[in-house]
Image: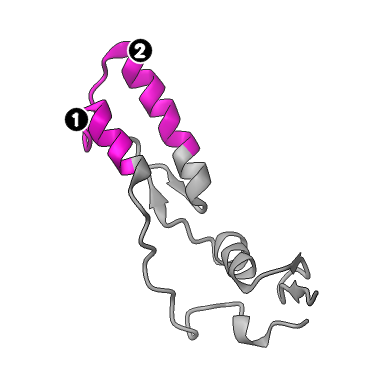
Amino acid sequence: MNELNCNACGKQFSTKYNLRKHVEALHLKLKPYTCQTCTKTFAYKHSYCQHMQVHLRVAASSDQSFPQAQTLKALSALLTKPYNPPPAPSKAQNKVDLTSVSR
């Protein structure tokens, strides 16, 4: 199996997708997931979902309302909604060129 290496740090990945996510999160510092309750940002969807579970538990125990999701049902719908990522930055904006990935 061919391994893909990050040109910035040398870490190896088995898929281009995982390499791209690594570069976006760690080297480009992109955080496309934003909590609508406290505005904290996250690089990975799973981290965002884990964070939102905290708000769900707090709301369930204290009947707290949310600025963007007035009910637990609405907040749960946000968590299960498929994420449509923003368009990738242009190659001119990238500091790490994914097209020259070494194998």
Q: Main secondary structure of the magenta part?
A: helix
**Few, some or many C-alpha atoms within 10 Å of disc 2 (few <14, some 14-19, many ≥20)?**
few
Q: Is 91 situated above or below 53?
A: below
Asked which secondary structure carries label 1, the reply is: loop
Q: Quadrant of the C terminus?
A: bottom right
The residue that appears at 29% across and 35% down in the rendered structure is 75
- Residue 34's x, y, as percent? 37, 48
The quadrant in which residue 76 appears is top left
Asked which secondary structure carries label 2, the reply is: helix
The quadrant in which residue 59 appears is top left
The figure's colour scheme reads one colour
Is 65 contained in the magenta span? Answer: yes
- Residue bearing mark 2: 61
The residue that appears at 19% across and 30% down in the rendered structure is 70
Q: Is 37 situated above or below 43?
A: above
Magenta residues (range): 50-78
Q: Quadrant of the N terminus?
A: bottom right
What's the CA distance linking mark 2 and mark 1? 15 Å
Q: Is 99 situated above or below 23?
A: below
Q: Which mark is residue 70?
A: 1
Is residue 92 visible in the rendered image? The answer is yes
